Image: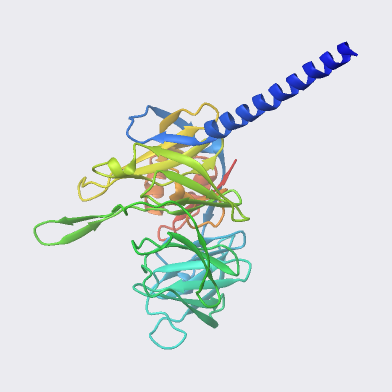
Amino acid sequence: MLKVNNILYILLSYLILYFVFCGCTSEKTNKDSLIQINISVSYPVKEIRLEDIADIEYLQFELDDDFLFQNAPHAVTSEKIITSYDGNILIFSRDGKPFSKFNRKGNGPGEYPSINQLLYDEASDEVLIRSFFSNKIMVYTTSGEFKRLIPLNSGTNPNNEIVVYNSELLLLYDDREVAPTRFSFISTEDGGVVETIDMPKDKKITVVLQLIDEKNVIIAREPAYHIVRHNNGYLLTDFSVDTVYFLSHNKELSPILVRKPKVQSMDPVVYLNSFIEAGNYEFMNSVKVTNENFRLPKTYLMRDKTTGKVYRQVITLNDYKGKAVTLSPETIANTQNSRLGFISLDLTELKDANRENKLTGALKELVDNSDDIGNDIYMLLHFK
């Protein structure tokens, strides 16, 4: 009987040690899985090929006198590509063919005086337009029928980010010091706050710079992304704090990245635009809020997910000798899909490169068949 009790005691001890070890291991794994980026370090350069991390789909919109534009698309989805020019909303099918067009520019009911932000809800097939200096969102069908007006909080900064979370909710970033929270869900019907997201915040930092030359006042800024699509959720960044959070599709919030050094201790400030994933890497960029030839200098970084090592980006293309591109949250800002990137290639530049025998493959074939006054060529990047 004593032997049995001893054996049970030993087994129980092993079980206790096992669970303690598992608990420690789990804690260590969670800690180690938190991405850490020191943006004050000068990292080495690493060159990779774009084709190794993404399948490239080249796209060129058909020439059509009724569908002329000069802006990059506002929204790229699985079915449609939407852009605007001079008050016109131009909608193309995913193969670049004209689909529909409308213009409701004006100051009357159901009209927009300008276009500052354009969003598209693929599920409801609605186009949402916000004008400059406006706290109203106008909602239209893709044929231009006015559906409703969404009023926003009167104190909301008209330039603050808004994304379509789903057909019932918009996700809003609010940078006001008096705002009780930086992020909230608002109704797509009446603009009311449905739910707030409880995140840490600190003293607001400035990500723009006011510069004065002999004649003008210049506002220097670079893209600052507080809401970035990631897997089935979003990365939320308040640049006043050092942690980036992941918001899952079921609204669970968890830390995913920590930047160093502490942003509140930096002068000048350097902010980090979270990241996107492609292949075995995470791609991001940092921006230093200081004057460099009337611009804010940017550094493009990439982190190897396997080793944790960080490098400066050099991303080359097989089809375009001597051309390098960069990847960051800006690459997916208009695609509504964290696995789909978008890069514009200037046709005039491509024509010159083609004459210098720098192009090959599908890109060369497309440029060979393009008119000199044709539309630019876009790369849709399907990340591996």
Q: Report the side of 295 relative to 52 (left or right).
A: left
Residue at the limit of the structure toward the front, as seen here: 2
Residue 198 vertical placement versus 297 (above, below): below
Q: Residue 296 or 142: which is nearer the viewer? A: 296
Q: Is residue 323 visible?
A: no
Lateral position of residue 68 relative to residue 76, left or right: left
Q: Is residue 315 above or below residue 176?
A: above
- Picture residue at 35% right of the left edge, 51% below the top: 202
Residue placed furthest toward the right: 1
Residue that protrudes farthest toward the bottom in the picture: 108
Q: Quadrant of residue 7?
A: top right
Residue 367 coordinates in the image, percent (x, y): 47, 50
Residue 349: image location, x then y, percent:
37, 49
Q: Residue furthest top?
A: 3
Q: Is residue 252 visible?
A: yes
Q: Is residue 303 above or below residue 217?
A: above
State how the image is colored: rainbow
Q: Quadrant of the C terminus?
A: top right
Quarter of the image with the N terminus is top right
Give left or right: position of 42 versus 63: left
Tell me where residue 285 appears, x and y as whole percent.
Answer: 39, 42
